[in-house]
Image (tube, helix red, strand yellow):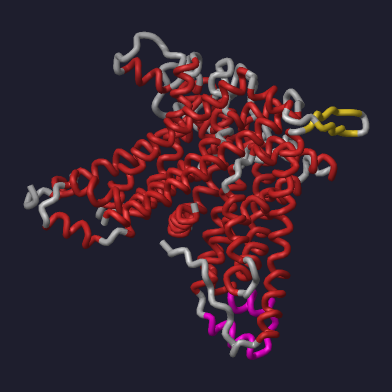
């Protein structure tokens, strides 16, 4: 078997065959959704369903990004996710650097508390946060999500960034210190540029988490003008009819930013998942 | 995988005491914004939620009024059949999905490990379900499961497995199973990637030595791969268990907790009691109970984990 001349034969090892099967199972439901988004609205409810869109149409996209205003939800998601990611990276690297490099007392205790916080179920804080947002007059605003998203993603980001800061040679800081650079300059001009891979990992994870979050978004920001994409999807349609064509057109567009981000930073994501596993 | 190095050396500038104090102060200044936000948005609300669960909360014109209620919210909640069902459902849901995801994830990780070409491509494909918005995943599956025009019925009937359309989300048992399948589809890749990373850390020499000693593939898996992978497996197990116990998005969008209350998890029940019934005391009692169970599970896991690490060290 090993010396079979046929190239196909050599390629057909068990692991390659399984790999193709796994890829098909992972992709098929997604492809079916994208495929459906190009079908004429009437063909979406047809049984048995047709394999390909016939005729191919953009009608669902016109409906999602016209009367159904999904562009607004995407804008809201983008504002909230980008702002939260920036806050997490800024505050996370300041804290991660301190916990990794500066001689603070009780660092290990703080790191353990951060770990514990990151496993708490979101539902535990929803009701008090709702009352807090209500008292602050923040319900239906961007900050109602940016602030909690920043808080919930900081612990993981601090851990990831601290791990990266630990790998940067100490000499670089010391040279800066001897030259009389301030602590801020040492962090932002000497240390941060070295930790770019860590910033990518923490940034990709935070952005993905914010882009997909539903529970807080539906609790604090369910009005039409502040809905994020997950809320817009969850509350679309009525109990009896779901216009799947429109929904899938919106979904296909909503998937793109995160899909591109994850594919571009594939290595970062895999290493982040691995570190996430280590920190548990 | 980077080893967790908790001990870091302090800056060594000839043991300058004032500098050390100065740097420590700087550390607190740098950390202050992060600690302030985390404390304000996570630690304080968790404590406040415990307080709410011990209060009678009534809505008046001047806002919410809190009155001490002792354990009455808890006894109300724990004796309620909806809570008991949601607790049972959440436990079974967690047990089944996590077990299946670990078994399938192990298989996928082994395939990734063995793969000689196209590994990057498969990893990229696996990241897509993981990064997908769960609400979208739920709508996608509800379309596939649809009893009138769903593609699953077309497949099942085309293969002659059923003579008439199946209402997948219409009966409790089928709806529970269908929800679990959708969860397994989305989350197995996450488990697989973690386990794959664990496999990559095992030295290839270990496997070579095994095959030289004449170990078969099956034997090598049980005797070598699995024991060496145990720490990674336990971490994946812990992480997934805690996550699955707080499940909200998928059943909320896919079935709305139905039919009836068949797929109502603790998080969904708590959300409904809080925001639909506006019963803040009992809602907080459900949320706090969920948190306590999650913490207890984490504690037991860490205990068992430590014991097992000790065992494997003493046996080798």
Q: Nearer the viewer, residue B125 or B176?
A: B176
Q: Nearer the viewer, residue B312 or A62?
A: B312
Relative to B38, residue B6 above or below: below
Quarter holding residue B16: bottom right
Residue extent of the magenta highlight: A170-191
Left or right relative to B194: residue B72: right
Relative to B201, residue B157 above or below: above
Quarter holding residue B275: top right
Count of number-bearing discs: 0
State the residue lying farthest toward the front.
Answer: B314
Quarter holding residue B160: top left
Q: Residue at x 34, y 51 (%)?
A: B311
Q: Nearer the viewer, residue A89 or B57?
A: B57
- Type of secondary structure dominating the magenta stretch: helix
Q: Residue at x 48, y 20 (%)?
A: B175
Q: For residue A117, say whether it is visible.
A: yes
Q: For residue A249, say whether it is visible.
A: no
Residue A223 part of the magenta-drawn span: no
């Amino acid at each position: 078997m090993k010396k079979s001349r046929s190239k196909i034969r050599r390629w057909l090892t068990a692991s390659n065959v399984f790999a193709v099967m796994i890829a098909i199972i992972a992709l098929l439901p997604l492809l079916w959704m994208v495929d459906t988004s190009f079908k004429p609205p009437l063909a979406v409810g047809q049984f048995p369903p047709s394999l390909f869109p016939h005729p191919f149409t953009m009608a669902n996209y016109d409906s999602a990004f016209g009367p159904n205003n999904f562009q607004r939800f995407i804008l809201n998601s983008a504002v909230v996710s980008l702002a939260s990611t920036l806050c997490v990276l800024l505050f996370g690297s300041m804290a991660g650097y301190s916990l990794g490099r500066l001689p603070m007392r009780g660092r290990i205790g703080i790191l353990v508390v951060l770990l514990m916080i990151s496993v708490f179920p979101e539902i535990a804080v929803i009701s008090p946060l709702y009352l807090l947002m209500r008292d602050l007059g923040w319900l239906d605003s961007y900050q109602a999500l940016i602030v909690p998203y920043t808080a919930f993603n900081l612990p993981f980001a601090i851990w990831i960034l601290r791990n990266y800061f630990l790998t940067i040679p100490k000499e670089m800081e010391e040279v800066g210190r001897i030259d009389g650079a301030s602590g801020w300059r040492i962090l932002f001009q000497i240390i941060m540029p070295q930790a770019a891979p860590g910033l990518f990992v923490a940034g990709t994870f935070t952005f993905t988490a914010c882009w997909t979050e539903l529970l807080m978004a539906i609790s604090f920001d369910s009005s039409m003008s502040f809905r994020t994409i997950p809320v817009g999807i969850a509350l679309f349609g009525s109990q009896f009819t779901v216009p799947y064509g429109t929904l899938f057109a919106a979904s296909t567009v909503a998937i793109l930013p995160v899909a591109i981000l994850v594919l571009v930073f594939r290595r970062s994501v895999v290493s982040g998942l691995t570190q996430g596993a280590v920190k548990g | 995988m980077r080893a967790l190095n908790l001990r870091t050396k302090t800056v060594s500038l000839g043991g300058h005491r004032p500098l050390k104090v100065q740097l420590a102060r700087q550390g607190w200044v740098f950390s202050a914004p992060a600690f302030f936000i985390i404390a304000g948005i996570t630690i304080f609300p968790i404590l406040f939620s415990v307080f709410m669960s011990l209060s009678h909360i009534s809505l008046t014109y001047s806002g919410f009024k809190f009155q001490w209620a002792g354990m009455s919210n808890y006894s109300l909640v724990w004796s309620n059949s909806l809570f008991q069902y949601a607790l049972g459902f959440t436990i079974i849901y967690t047990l089944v999905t996590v077990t299946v995801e670990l078994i399938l994830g192990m298989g996928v990780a082994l395939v990734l490990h063995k793969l000689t070409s196209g590994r990057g491509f498969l990893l990229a494909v696996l990241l897509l379900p993981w990064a997908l918005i769960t609400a979208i995943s739920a709508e996608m599956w509800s379309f596939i499961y649809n009893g009138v025009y769903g593609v699953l019925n077309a497949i099942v009937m085309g293969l002659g497995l059923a003579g008439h359309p199946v209402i997948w989300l219409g009966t409790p048992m089928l709806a529970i199973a269908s929800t679990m399948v959708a969860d397994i589809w989305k989350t197995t890749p996450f488990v697989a990637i973690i386990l794959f990373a664990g496999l990559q850390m095992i030295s290839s020499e270990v496997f070579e030595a095994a095959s030289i000693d004449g170990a078969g593939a099956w034997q090598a898996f049980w005797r070598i791969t699995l024991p060496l992978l145990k720490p990674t497996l336990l971490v994946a197990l812990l992480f997934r268990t805690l996550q699955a116990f707080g499940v909200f998005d998928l059943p909320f969008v896919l079935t709305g907790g139905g039919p009836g209350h068949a797929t109502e998890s603790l998080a969904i029940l708590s959300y409904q009691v809080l925001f639909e019934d506006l019963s803040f005391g009992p809602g907080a009692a459900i949320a706090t109970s969920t948190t306590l169970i999650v913490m207890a599970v984490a504690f037991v896991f860490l205990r068992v984990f430590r014991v097992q690490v000790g065992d494997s060290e003493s046996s080798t």
